[in-house]
Amino acid sequence: MAEDISITIPKAALIIHKGMTKRFYIILTDELDQPLDLAGCAAEMHIRETADVASGEPLIRLSTSLGTVVITPATGRLDIHVPHFASSAVFIGVKRGVFDLELYWANGEVTRVLEGPVTFTEEVTRQVI
């Protein structure tokens, strides 16, 4: 039988400037501060207006399958890339949201590795080039 354990999910506050590219990374380590081996893992991150189940489609979806989350297995590193076209697609007037980032292990387990609030700033310049 699996042992019940209590975990604390790391929190981060994101600021996304609509119309801009945003890149950041996290490194996952074990209790000895050694990088986790992420071989065979996939990742998915959703940004939504609310965490409510009825919130529908995410405002922004990032994943390894889309190429917007890149995992370096040996170093435990996840590189997250919010393309400018994804941040531009967030509706005008949406100022806040929430996100989480989940890791999908080869054995079928899912781990939430990061979560928190998102603040959006409006874009003034419109591309005319």
Image (cartoon, rainbow, N blue to C red):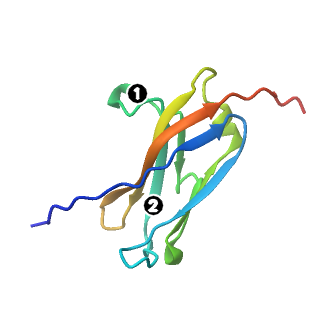
Q: Amino acid at mark 2?
A: Ala
User: Where in the figure is residue 108, as x and y percent of width and height?
Assistant: 30, 62
Residue drawn at (54%, 47%) of the image: 62
Residue farthest to the left? 1
SS state under label 1 = helix
Residue 45 numbered tag: none
Q: Which residue is mark 1?
A: 55
**86 left or right, relative to 3:** right
| Residue 100 visible within the image | no
Disc 1 crowd, CA 10 A, few/some/many (<14, 14-19, 20+): few
User: Where in the figure is residue 73, as x and y percent of width and height?
Assistant: 50, 73
Of the pair 14 and 38, the residue shown nearer to us: 14
The quarter in which the N terminus is drawn is bottom left
SS state under label 2 = strand
The quarter in which the C terminus is drawn is top right
Mark 2–mark 1 distance (CA, rounded to whole Å): 24 Å
> Residues at badges 2 and 1 in contact (C-beta under 8 Å)?
no
Q: Nearer the viewer, mark 2 or mark 1?
A: 1
Q: Amino acid at mark 1?
A: Ser
**127 left or right, relative to 91:** right
Above or below residue 57? Residue 108 is below
Above or below residue 38? Residue 102 is above
Above or below residue 26? Residue 91 is above
User: Where in the figure is residue 88, as x and y percent of width and height?
Assistant: 68, 33
Residue drawn at (49%, 33%) of the image: 97
Q: Earlier in the sequence, mark 2 or mark 1?
A: 2
Above or below residue 51? Residue 43 is below
Disc 2 crowd, CA 10 A, few/some/many (<14, 14-19, 20+): some
Q: Which residue is mark 2?
A: 42
| Residue 9 visible within the image | yes
User: Where in the figure is residue 99, as x and y percent of width and height?
Assistant: 46, 42
